[in-house]
Image: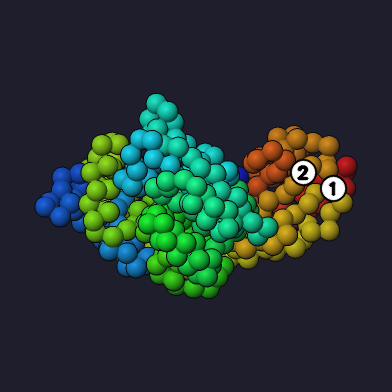
Amino acid sequence: MIDLRSDTLTIPDDEMLKTILSAKLGDDGRVDENGRGEDLSVNELEDIAARLTGKDEGVLFSSGTLANTAAILTYCSPGDKVLVDEILHIYKSEKVVFEKSVGQLIPVLYKLNEKSKPDTQHLRQLMEENDIKLLCIENTHNFSGGVCLDANDLKEIYDLAKEFNIHVHMDGARLFNATASLNVDPKDLCKYVDSLMFCISKGLGAPIGSLLCGNNNFIKKLRQKRKLLGGNMRQAGVIAAPGIHALKHNIEKLKEDNENAKYVSEGIKDLKKIKVQDKVQSNIVMLDVSNTGMSPEEYCEAARKKGLKIRPVLENKVRLVFYNGINRKDADEVIKIIRDIDKSM
């Protein structure tokens, strides 16, 4: 069975797991006057994350959801308005900051343009009409099929936000898939956001964790919010050590995942019933099943019976996500299965 439901399905290799045995452990929740914990492995991972992104500091979280939540609540107070797009992961899947019983923030929805990137004209209009506290963006954009925002896109968005004194937070869960696709240094993208989160437990292959990076003042407040949300951990070096290994050894490998996604999309672009997204940029491929006579759930079940696990997303689409457990032979089999399903319709 080939499983393309998500890149969270990566399994750490032996070399990564061995790093746990030699990790320097301490109480990460017991902090000094600078807010740093006593787990040296966590501190090392956070420092690497900050260097890679060009930010002052990084903070380890157990999940991207918790990291994004803590970041947004650091910027905002109940009743504040936050710019999000309708299918932004923070808004569509995480939601906690917008729950009336929890975060009590107010979402203001901006449009995506024909390239599935934030529509800056609409952003300007919303900024002029509303008292906005925070703008959230996503790179790569999950439910748009892994669309990448390049440095020019980000600069335009960031400069616009600063006209209105609005902070910009980036959900960069798959940031390094974007940098691999665009062939740029992470700093080239991260300099146009005030804070960002990236996951080490997706394509990078670590078992657990996400990093939140930003400037000193923001991070100091963020650490306080992390504690309030129950995000402090003790001997978290067992999480950090695989993360260090991932950042040192696995970033370059993401190019292979992106290439496999593009390879599959090319192999199925001429199907009669399935519409493949126009341009695959990273490790995600979206299939529109509107013309198949099947619901996304039914299509995924048909694929499962042939040996391929995929997942339904949005109203009429299914998603394939490539990662380091999937090789070119698997990609060829995926093409065959999808073509077989198309022929049977």
Compare residues 20 and 108 and report the one nearer the observer: 108
Q: Quadrant of residue 213?
A: bottom left
Viewport quadrant of the N terminus: top right
Judge by depth and name the residue closer to the eye, 85 or 318: 85
x, y percentage for residue 282?
59, 61
Within 10 Å of disc 2 (Cα), the crowding (few <14, some 14-19, many 20+) is many
Figure quadrant of the C terminus = top right
Q: Using the image, determine if residue 91 lies above or below residue 270.
A: above
* Residue ID for mark 1: 273
Type of residue at label 1?
A: Lys
The outermost residue toward the top is 101
- Left or right, residue 251 beside residue 143: left
Residue 158 at least partly seen? no
At mark 2, the secondary structure is loop
Report, in whole angstroms, how far the alpha carbon at label 1 lies from the one at label 2: 7 Å
Q: Residue at the location (53% across, 66% down)?
A: 153
Residue placed furthest toward the left:
33
Q: Which residue is drawn at 60% across and 50% down?
A: 111
Q: Name the kind of residue labelled 2 in the image.
A: Val
